Each structure stands twice: as C-alpha cells, then as structure tokens.
Amino acid sequence: MPFATNLHTHTYRCQHASGDASDYARHACAAGLAVLGMADHTPLPDGRWPDMRMAMDELDGYQAAVDRARAEYPQLRILMGLECEFAVEYESFYRDEILGRRGFDYLIAGCHYTPLDGGWIPSFGGLDSSRTLRAYADYTIRSMASELFAFVTHPDLIGCSNQEWTTNTAACARDICQAATALGVPLEINSYGLRKPWMNIPGGSRPAYPWLPFWETAQDMGTSVVLSSDAHRPVDVAAGYAEVAAIRDRYRLHEADLSYLTQPRTGAASR
C-alpha cells in the first residue's frame, strides 16, 4: 500500500536533493498519491545555514515550480510548504511573509540545529549528553508552542547521536511527546532514515531514525503522528510507507488528520 498523502518533499534547491516539483508530482501520480506536499528547506532572511537550503532569491522560483506542477497534474492535490528552523527572529518572516503574503499552505518544524550557550549545535549527531538532549527537547517544544507548524519532522533524530536508549534519551522523548500531545502538534515518523546508512550498534545495526523506543514513548503519551517519506529524489516520493505504517500500527499510534491543510485558510497562522 502506498502513501495516500506525503507532505514532506524536497527539490534540488536545498542542495542535497534532486528533481523539481513536477518530477515529484509525476511520480506521486504514478504511485497513486492523492495529496503531495512540497516542503523544501526554507530560505532565511539572514542567510543562516546556507549549505542545506535554498537562497532567498530562489523562493519565487520555488513557488513558480509548485504552481507549474499544479497546472501540469490537476488530478493531484499539491500543497506548498517549507521545512523550517524556528527562531524568534524568523517568526514574523514565517507568519507574515510565508504564510501571510505568499499564502503558503503549511510549515514543518525541522530542528536540524539546537540552540545552546548562545550558539547552535547540529541536532544530527550533536545530542550525545544529558545537557544537549535537554536543549533539543526544550527547543522542539518551543517550536511547537509557536503555533507555526503543522507537525515536527524526524523528532527521533536523537538516534543519530546515541547508540543505546538511556535515561537521558527517554527523558528527552518523554518531554517532547508529552508536549506534542498537550499542544496538539503531531510528530512525524520519517522513512528517509531507512534509506540512509544504518548505525552500527552492539549486536548489529539499526536506522538512526525511526528509532523505535521513541515511538513506544509516543504511544505512552498518546501522541498523534504523521507518516512521511521525506523524499529527496522523485523516485522516493512514496517510499517506505509499509515500514512507517508498521511502526504506527505496532505502537497503536493515532494518525493525525491534516486534511484541514487542503482547505482555504482563514488566518495566516491557523492550524
């Protein structure tokens, strides 16, 4: 069974993906998707982290590419989104410019970097202590509390930094899942980690994410989830559904209803 909806899709503009919106739409139609969400890495007004996102002068072209795909594949509902890092200095840009003036359909919270001691550390691979895990949990919760984001992508990326499940990783997961439930923000089970090189751990190997103990915690907290392929190649636009659906079913996780994203928005930041 393929995805019916995939809301996490990139283009060549992020510098670590290939293809454009029409390429993904073509593959989505062939795979039987009904809804495709384009969510490339957002440009930032100050040019921060330029090695993994489009530049500001590419944003108009990104919008035009999504509009072109909509015209070419009218049988597919195509949504226009961005994957973002939250920071107070970007809040008005996201709310007023992206969701407001430009009329994007949704934003995803990415949390690829974690604020610590006045700077930022990489969340992929940099969360290997109780202090950094605490900072990541706090930052993810602040991102959700901003009410800007439809869901949080790969919240279990802590598996990239830790071989084993510990009291520290358990506390981080518990706090994130508890807040997600309280705030009504779904967490994403992301199949891209299954396509990346697996981590060597004592006794074998595993994907860095999805990390199963995190999703067991989500079950305990009653957290709702979103299933996404996080496609970086057109051929992967529907990849990994069986695997992430199996995690959803194994832990009896409730899949969030995000159909509101396909309806006209009444406010720039409404969820």
Image (cartoon, rainbow, N blue to C red):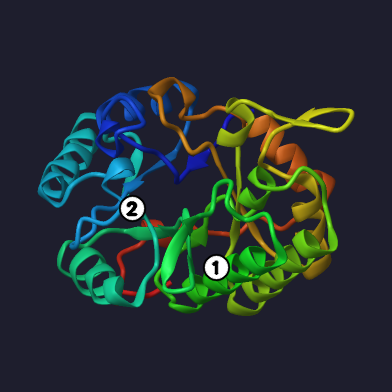
Q: Nearer the viewer, residue 159 or 126?
A: 126
Query: In the image, residue 60 lies at what x, y percent?
Result: 11, 48
Query: In the image, residue 103 lies at what x, y percent?
Result: 21, 62
Q: From the image, which quarter does the C terminus lie in?
A: bottom left
Q: Nearer the viewer, residue 177 or 1?
A: 177
Q: Residue 174, relative to residue 31: is it above or below?
A: below
Q: Secondary structure at mark 2?
A: strand
Observer able to see residue 170: yes
Residue density around tag 2, few if under 14, some if 14–19, many if 20 or more, within 10 Å: many
Which residue reaches farthest right? 203
Query: In the image, residue 85 lies at what x, y percent?
Result: 39, 61
Of the numbered discs 2 and 1, the one sitting upstream in the chain is: 2
Q: What label does residue 173 carry, if any?
A: none
83 relative to 218 in the view: left or right: left
Q: Residue at x 46, y 29 (%)?
A: 237
Q: Residue 116, relative to residue 152: is it above or below?
A: below
Which corner quadrant of the image does residue 223 belong to? bottom right
Query: In the image, residue 257 lies at what x, y percent?
Result: 56, 59
Q: From the image, which quarter does the N terminus lie in?
A: top right
Q: Nearer the viewer, residue 150 or 198?
A: 198
Residue under pointer 1: 140
Residue under pointer 2: 82
Q: Secondary structure at mark 1?
A: helix
247 relative to 235 in the view: left or right: right
